[in-house]
Image (spheres, rainbow, N blue to C red):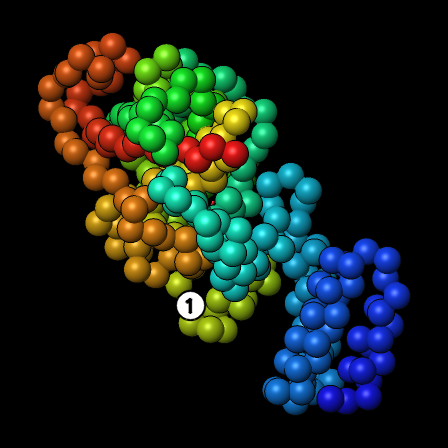
Amino acid sequence: MSSITRQALKSFENAPNPRFKQVMQSLVRHLHAFADEVELTEEEWWEGIRFLTDTGHMCDGFIRQEFILLSDTLGLSMLVDEINHRQVANGTETTVFGPFYIDGMPDRAFGENMAFTPGDATLIHGRVLDTHGQPVADVVLDVWQTASNGMYSGQDVDQPTGNLRGRYRTDANGNFAIRTILPVCYPVPTDGPVGRMLDAAQRLAWRPGHVHFVLERPGYTRLVTHLFTEGDPYLGSDAVFGVKQSLQVVYEDRAEQDELSAQVGMPLPFKRAYYEFVLESE
Ligand code: BEZ
Ligand code: FE
């Protein structure tokens, strides 16, 4: 070990917070080992500093968070997700949160339409259960997805506020219903330093079609996940490594009304997917 590494490690020796000390000493050890392994040149060190500076400048404090995008495209976000959900019993699997969540979106009624821009009419419905198979009432499902142009409201100034976003709630039997449009595959933003990195690696920027969900109810572990579209061409090459088999749903073509679709006023024809989320007790 270089004496510089030894000195840098020692400089954290007296940190009063033991977790801070552990994390910082490990970070120093791995950073130094990395520089040693690749024999980092001064020009490359500068390029790294420029890259991180550009990444910070690309963040707008609202919806563009280039550091999250960097973490996502390096696989770090999904690794942290995996580390923190290792003891999952039989709850629904988690996946990446992503940078496009907006807090405080409107509460929506059972089956309310959250799409104010065109697309294939779609009904996503299902139930929320506990790990014993019992329905869970009053679960808030915070939902967001892109419009048919592959952009999120907030990211795309031409979309109305709250488009394809909303907070749904399960009824007394644990049922939920969301009227929306079919999610599309879309590329993560490539107009910043992360885009330059993907380009240099000849990597695809695409994510398969999905709808984001955060499920919350006191007494249960918060669930951050997606529903992916089965058959999407990018399921095997998600730019952020978020795909899990158990999170894929089939959208069936429906040409006629059924009781639920009539109740929520689906136009014909429409697509329909069913999913059962399982929440774990805290
Ligand atoms: C998303 O699905 O919204 C997303 C996730 C990670 C990076 C970029 C976008
Ligand atoms: Fe997304």
Where's residue 188, x and y in %? 47, 52
Task: Identify the residue position indicated by label 1 in the image.
Answer: 203
Q: Residue at the far top: name it.
A: 263
Corner quadrant of residue 213: top left
Where's residue 123, x and y in %? 27, 25
The residue shown at (57%, 33%) is 102
Residue 59 seen from this side: yes
Corner quadrant of residue 247: top left
User: Looking at the picture, which amino acid does disc 1 mark?
Assistant: Arg
Is 98 left or right of 63, judged from the image as shown?
Answer: left
| 26 to 156, vertically: above or below | below
Query: Mark 1 CB in 8 Å range of ligand 1?
Result: no
Label 1: state its secondary structure: loop
| 162 to 111, vertically: above or below | below
Where's residue 13, x and y in %? 85, 69
Residue 118 seen from this side: no
The residue shown at (51%, 46%) is 98
| 259 to 51, vertically: above or below | above
Between 129 and 272, the residue placed more toward the observer is 129
Between 76 and 237, the residue placed more toward the observer is 76
